[in-house]
Amino acid sequence: MAKRKKGTQLPPGVHDILPEEQRYWERVRSVSSGLGFRRIDTPIFEFADLFMKSVGAASDIVEKQMYSFRTKGGDKLVLRPEETAPVARAYIVHGMHTLPQPVKLYYEGPMFRYESPQKGRYRQFHQYGVEVLGGESPIVEAQIIQLFFRMFQALKIKVLVEINSIGCKQCRPIYKKILSTYYRSRSRQVCADCRKRSGKNILRVLDCKEEKCQMIKQGAPPIVDHLCDACRNHFKMFLEYVEELDLPFVINHYLVRGLDYYSRTVFEFLPENIDKEEASRAQVALGGGGRYDYLVELLGGRPTPAAGAALGIERLIAYMKQSNIEIESKTKPRVFLIQLGEVAKKKSLKVFDEFIKNKISITESFGKESIDPQLSLANKLGVAYALILGHKEALEETIIIRDMKTGTQRTVPLSDVVKEVKKGLRG
Ligand code: HAM
């Protein structure tokens, strides 16, 4: 194959979403809207500081994955790698603490992370997420999990949720010391990355995928044994709520998540039947989230307990495709307008417009002149009806309605065509 010029190549890790794929996106959007949350859109770029402070200077996202650039004015900006921090920023900037609490928001849009591109991992990807700000009770996390399960169910995706608690400002530092001591005495047995992490951000050792570190990890003290009373109580109540939901979940004592803003509850949604030994969690997790009670305050707002979660839309779609979950496009045209001859062509624009006004999806091929190619296109598109406006019909102010399934045709007055097609589509 001839080598493509740089200008027509895609940069690594990004992808086009072609018309034939849109039906999957439509489907995800349709099951995610109307859940009682209000939509928020924030800018694609923000000050770098926002993510350094919140996601954490020592996190992979900030250390290795941010698309950052300086403006001519000298500001350091980044393409947003995630949306929780921007939503927390918006909550503060727009004084949302004055609204009835909790404030429930959702978003959908592109995120950017400079990761090594591979299956399930892109540099521009899309998230659907929800954030609940101003809610302290563990019922908030349980409700988010329930809501996402309903979405998975509607998309016919089978998932398992893994959950854990990573404590609070009081108990986590104590646990970190215990974990450090445990790893220090085993530093020769773990990988170089874990040795590095033990110094910088000890919790991240629990995220390690290296074969030789797994045994050490399995023997590490679990954090739930070291939670303070308030965190233990929160976790216990959370578990009770989740049990009530009757959903498949497991406690994973080593689930810590790679973003620094979390406190107490963390969770991740994994496809139910993956080989977890083989697949890297970072590539297969369909979504994740948790509580982040300090984030708003950290960014300069008032203390605001909060929780949220986000799904990776590309991963949901890849799963649907892999499992042959078929989806009909909602915007698939139902009607095809065929025109023959100059007089008919002139009239056809108006006919087309009538259908659009009546919200019946219609398509045409005005560039084609004879009937066969137009009919064969109508066939290919799988429309219910083809409308044939020939020279004779155009002069007589009539039009032929052809039922594409049965091949039967009838002529109706042009002024009745929308009404007749509507009737047929309903029937
Ligand atoms: P996250 O786990 O970094 O969490 O991302 C959430 C989901 O986005 C992942 O589970 C995955 O499905 C998808 N995702 C992440 N990176 C990529 C990538 N490079 N390519 C394709 N999909 C990807 C967050 O971003 C948090 N803000 C979630 C949250 C909301 N926590 C509280 N509220």
Image (cartoon, rainbow, N blue to C red):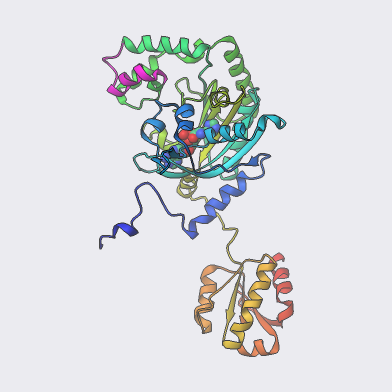
| Residue 141 placement: quadrant | top right
Can residue 326 be seen by looking at this rendering?
no
Q: Quick one: quadrant of the C terminus?
A: bottom right
Task: State left or right for residue 161 relative to residue 70.
Answer: right
Foreground residue, 265 or 334? 265
Can residue 424 be seen by looking at this rendering?
yes
Residue at 61% of width from left, 85% of height from top? 344
Residue at 45% of width from left, 44% of height from top? 125
- Residue furthest toward the front? 73
Q: Position of residue 23 (x, y in %)?
A: 54, 55
Q: Quick one: quadrant of the N terminus?
A: bottom left
Residue 215 forms part of the magenta stretch: no
Q: Which residues are magenta?
A: 186-203
Vertical relation: 246 (above or below) 415 = above
Q: Position of residue 157 (x, y in %)?
A: 53, 42
Q: Position of residue 422 (x, y in %)?
A: 71, 69
Foreground residue, 201 or 311? 201
Task: State left or right for residue 262 relative to residue 176.
Answer: right
